[in-house]
Amino acid sequence: MAIGTKELAPVELDTFENERLFEELKKAKEELFNLRFQSATGQLESHGRLRAVKRDIARIYTVLRERELGIRATPVAVEPPAKAEKAEKKTKKAKAAPESTTDDAAAEAVETKEA
């Protein structure tokens, strides 16, 4: 059984996007700093938490590196249905607009050749 945060289990980290992993890494590093500070001042109650946070940091770095090397797949961002429909409409409009400008440019070229 892995020591650390249940939220940061390897199975859970696979579902996170890279941006979220970087956020979790930042949080874990801040927590480690605070725990070290508490340890130095004699206020730390749970010394096992230091070890758990260090392992969480290592686990996040491992997932990021494996994705970089192509060992692990990066999850695809899933858009809500409303946003997906809007994106499709925008791409259809964008595709339609260049075709009309291409036709206009071709018509202008023909007109200039005739003149």
Image: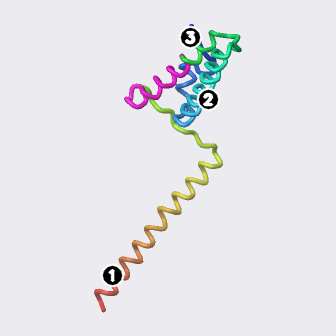
Which residue is painted at 59% across and 29% down in the image? 24
Residue type, mark 2 in image = Lys
Residue type, mark 3 in image = Ala
Asked where in the image residue 41 lies, by quadrant, the reply is top right
Picture coordinates of residue 5, whole percent (x, y): 62, 17
Mark positioned earlier in the residue sequence (3 or 2): 3
Say how many tags the image has.
3
Q: Quadrant of the N terminus?
A: top right
Picture coordinates of residue 109, whole percent (x, y): 33, 81
Q: Is residue 44 magenta?
A: no
Picture coordinates of residue 114, whole percent (x, y): 29, 89
Which of discs 2 and 1 lies nearer the camera? The answer is 2
Q: Quadrant of the C terminus?
A: bottom left
What crowding class fits label 1: few (fewer than 14 Cα within 10 Å), some (14-19), or many (20 or more)? Answer: few
Most frequent secondary structure within the magenta stretch: helix
Which residue is painted at 58% across and 31% down in the image? 26
Residue 86 vertical position relative to residue 73 in the rendered view, above or below: below
- Badge 3 is on which residue? 2
What is the span of residues highlighted in magenta in the rendered image?
55-71
